[in-house]
Image (spheres, coloured by chain):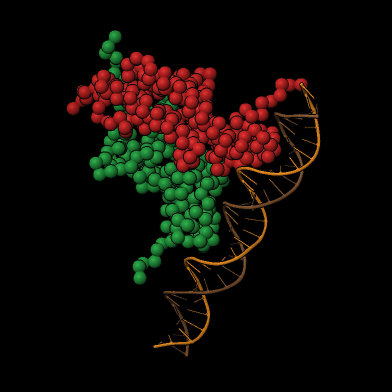
Chain colours: A green, B red, C orange, D brown
Amino acid sequence: MATPPDRRAIILDKAAELFARKGISATTVREIGDAAGILSGSIYHHFDSKDTIIDAIVSSYFDDMLAGYAEVLASDADASERLHGLVLTSLHCAAAHPHASELYQRDRNHLRETPRFAYVRDAVAEMRRTWLTVIEAGVAEGAFRTDIRPKILYPIIRDGLWRTVEWFRPSEAYDTDDLADDCFAFFRQALAVQVPAAAA
Amino acid sequence: MATPPDRRAIILDKAAELFARKGISATTVREIGDAAGILSGSIYHHFDSKDTIIDAIVSSYFDDMLAGYAEVLASDADASERLHGLVLTSLHCAAAHPHASELYQRDRNHLRETPRFAYVRDAVAEMRRTWLTVIEAGVAEGAFRTDIRPKILYPIIRDGLWRTVEWFRPSEAYDTDDLADDCFAFFRQALAVQVPAAAA
DNA sequence: TCAGACCATACAAGCATTTGCTTGGTTGGT
DNA sequence: ACCAACCAAGCAAATGCTTGTATGGTCTGA
């Protein structure tokens, strides 16, 4: 007999996929049950509520992300290397939790308004602080441009990066590391101090 | 007596706001009715269905966007100027239809899967073609970098730009044109051919 | 070794509420 | 008299979740 399927993990995975694709509200517990090969009512043996499922999906995602960001901050590399670290961490963490990443971006308003998910606000604020710290350090070093405010730079970079989960599918010829290289090359040049225009 | 309120326009505006904030599925026609100062059943005097409301919101957004993009493509400016045009058009169109822009980004999977909204697929494909045309022209001109493929460059820029509707709120000191200037400066430098690294 | 207790897991059925939408009637302006 | 605009009421379906029960495995004690 095959090893008993870890139903809880299956439910989490299928639910995450459905939440990411259709949104929380449009995904019914019956659909989750169907996808997991179980009756909808049986889900409630493993989870207290729909929100509990969401919680399990989202919290592990942010835990991983914050751990990675903390490592980057702890290193005493220069701003450019830290930028590289943030890009790598963001893309690898998104690759490890693709559904959670999409789910958050899709339903973050719902998560924000639900008291149970207050920790998401904190996590997002922490990530923002991390990025701003790195960007402002780059400015202080004289490595990053000063003509655009960091608070404008940050969300542009963040959304360009985070949203890659919606369109990027790694292949043998071009995997997540390749994407990270390109993203870093892109944003590093975008952030660099301007070379004085040579042409008239 | 005040001029009679254009109830249809009110419904559209309130619905768009709710759809953008909560998502299509989580927004009920009763909520739309409440927001519009009307009973939910009365909405059906103005619109055939919930989808009809969505249609009205979304289609006008893409009509405007495509019209702007066509103008940019029609000009015989160089790639950098066209890039500027695309950034300006995108941000101004998003500013004119903020709710529709958020709505699409949030529920594009639903729109994609609903036959009625097939035109959205076409519009998005057309926008993608426009961006790729401009980027590839820049590469051909020798103005844009060649180390990152245009098909990777495009979605990064697109998401950084389009998602501004989620966080940017124009003020007197910094309005949509200021944001457009910064975005253009950012992406233009990111796209520029690499200056040969001076350091070892 | 094995009956018996126990428990995790699941099913079957259904309940209360919410949902998009319909129907029939009222009102006020022209 | 007519009609656009709206209300009041409610319907059938779908929703999150609950309840009661069945099943198959494991542990215990004699």
* Residue A174 at x, y percent in the picture: 26, 40
Question: Is A188 left or right of B6, judged from the image as shown?
Answer: left
Q: From the viewer's side, name the closer residue of B7 and A41.
A: B7
Q: Is residue B68 left or right of residue B77?
A: right
- Tell me which corner region of the image, top left, top right, bottom left or bottom right, holds residue A160: top left
Q: Return the x and y of residue B148 as percentages of the image width and height.
A: 27, 31
Q: Residue at x 36, y 32 (%)?
A: B155
Furthest-top residue in this view: A200
Q: How many marks?
A: 0
Report x, y in % for residue B193.
Answer: 26, 23
Residue found 41% across the figure and 34% down from its top:
A159
Q: Quadrant of residue A82?
A: top left
The quarter in which the C terminus of chain A is drawn is: top left
Q: Residue at x 45, y 60 (%)?
A: A37
Between B161 and B8, the residue placed more toward the observer is: B8
- Residue A70, visible in the rendered structure: no
Q: Quadrant of residue A146?
A: top left
Q: Position of residue B117 (x, y in %)?
A: 49, 36
- Is residue A158 rendered to the left or right of residue D5? left
Against A41, is B4 above or below? above
Residue at the left extreme, as displayed? B200
